Structures are given as C-alpha cells and as structure tokens.
Image: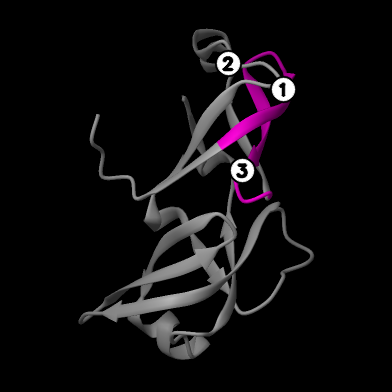
Amino acid sequence: MSMSIRNQFPGTVTAVTVGEAMASVKVRLAGGQDITAAITTDAVKDLGLAEGLAVKALVKSTEVALATGPVEGISIRNQIAGTVADVTTGGAMGSVKVTVEGGELTAAITKDAVEALGLAAGTSVVALIKSTEVSLAAA
C-alpha cells in the first residue's frame, strides 16, 4: 500500500506495556535507535504486538520537530540524532531531510524555524517525536 507518510522505519518490538485504554510499545529501529509509540490497547491486540515482532514505525513529517542538540527537561522521549541532508523552503514552510543511522527522515517545519535554527546541509540536529505521534504497522 502506498501512503503519504514519508517517515517509515523498520524495527523490532522490544517491550509492550499495556494499560486500561493505552499501551506503550518500545521499538528498536533498524539503525539501532529506540523509539516509543503510545497506541491504544485495542491496536496492540489487533496487530498482535509482542516482543520480537517486526514492525514499521510511521511518523508524519508534520509531527517531527527539530532541535540543534539534545533537549532536556521536556516530555518528548523520542530524540533521534542526525545530520541535515537537504532543505527546501517555500513562502511559509520548509521540508528538511535528515540522515539518521539506518535511513532518512523528513520534517515539515516553518520557514522561520529553518532560518532561526540556521538549518543547511551538514547541520547536526535532533529529531523530536512525541510517542503519541508514532503509529505502528505489522511488517
């Protein structure tokens, strides 16, 4: 199936913590990074998620924020280090491609943010992704 979600990372489930309505699923990405997805308990059951299962972590580019270094003191736990590969800007928005271990991700951010952060090819960045913005698909 083709989708508009550009950020699709293969990985393996390393832990599943199930609550009443929501679950926390930890995934080790092919590049070695760990990412957490907060999804419904029903989704865990429907997908048959369990430790060792191959999955794809999906993140819309509009849900990826960028920082010029690791960020502390915030609730966003998914922080993936990388290097800007390409920046394309228009009148209001920008598309930033970031090379990370095991692949590439795209962040859609404002043109103002691109300029304020001084983003250009070669800039070191950290992609920030809330766990509630990570979807999982069975691989």
Mark 1 Cα-neighbour bin, 10 Å: few <14, some 14–19, many ≥20: some
Please provide percent x and percent y for residue 90. 21, 80
Residue count near mark 2 (Cα–Cα under 10 Å), binned few <14, some 14–19, many ≥20: some
The image shows residue 102, relative to residue 40, as above or below, that is below
Kindly identify the amino acid type of the residue bearing the numbered disc 3: Leu
Local secondary structure at mark 2: helix
- Spatial CA distance of label 3 from label 2 is 18 Å
Query: Which dot marks residue 37?
Result: none
Choose the circle earlier in sequence order: 3 or 2. Answer: 3
Tell me the number on the disc at residue 44.
2
**Are the residues tagged 3 and 2 within 8 Å (C-beta)?**
no
User: Which dot marks residue 16?
Assistant: 1
Q: Which SS type dominates the magenta stretch?
A: strand
Q: Which residue lies furthest to the right in this view?
A: 73
- Distance, label 1 to label 3, CA atoms, is 15 Å
Q: Position of residue 16 (x, y in %)?
A: 72, 22
Q: How far apart are marks 1 and 2 (CA)?
A: 8 Å
Q: Is residue 127 above or below residue 41?
A: below
Which mark is first along the chain, 2 or 1?
1
- Does the stretch in magenta take in 68? no
Local crowd at mark 3 within 10 Å, few (<14), some, or many (≥20)? Answer: many
Q: Tell me where residue 44 appears, x and y as whole percent.
A: 58, 16
Mark drawn on residue 29: 3
Magenta-tinted stretch: 11-32
Q: Residue at x 20, y 82 (%)?
A: 91
